[in-house]
């Protein structure tokens, strides 16, 4: 039975710096020699580095959740940006457990 007391729990990852070096390294890793963004800009998928990874790490380290990765199904996620992300921004990433469900079969 899912533990519904977990719904609403938040995980914070403040202080994520969007630096030119990190953006360039990310772009190189995902594109190889091809250009995937304009220099000086931040590709939207870079959110995986400054938003998704740090907050997901907090979720996975929470001993109260007891997440077993084998058999885990990621059902949904969403992102919100009130303003465009720019080089030099310091972002506070967060994750929230919106629902807990058990699905079999």
Image: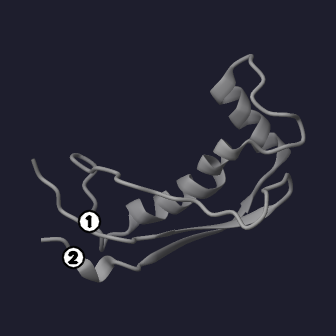
Q: Which mark is residue 25?
A: none
Position of residue 45 measured from the top left corner of the image (x, y, whole percent): 64, 43
Position of residue 91 measured from the top left corner of the image (x, y, whole percent): 72, 65
Q: Nearer the viewer, mark 2 or mark 1?
A: 2
Mark 2–mark 1 distance (CA, rounded to whole Å): 11 Å
Q: Is residue 93 above or below residue 75?
A: below
Q: Is 59 on the left-hand or right-hand side of 30?
A: left
Image quadrant where residue 94 sits: bottom right
Q: Is residue 97 above or below residue 41?
A: below
Give the residue number, with chain letter if any, for mark 1: 66
Position of residue 89 measured from the top left corner of the image (x, y, whole percent): 82, 61
Q: Secondary structure at mark 2?
A: loop
Q: Secondary structure at mark 1?
A: loop
Q: Is 70 on the left-hand or right-hand side of 25?
A: left
Q: Residue furthest right?
A: 40
Q: Is 75 on the left-hand or right-hand side of 41?
A: left
Q: Mark 2 packing: few (<14 Cα in 10 Å), some, or many (20+)?
A: few
Give the residue number, with chain letter if any, for mark 2: 3
Residue at left offset 74%, top offset 16%? 33
């Amino acid at each position: 039975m899912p533990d519904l007391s977990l719904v609403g729990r938040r995980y914070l990852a403040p202080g994520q710096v969007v630096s030119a070096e990190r953006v360039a390294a990310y772009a190189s890793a995902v594109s190889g020699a091809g250009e995937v963004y304009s220099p000086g800009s931040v590709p939207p998928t870079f959110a995986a580095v400054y938003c998704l990874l740090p907050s997901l790490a907090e979720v996975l380290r929470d001993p109260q959740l007891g997440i077993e990765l084998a058999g885990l199904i990621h059902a949904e996620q969403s992102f919100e940006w009130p303003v465009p992300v720019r080089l030099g921004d310091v972002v506070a990433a967060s994750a929230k457990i919106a629902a807990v469900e058990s699905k079999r079969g």
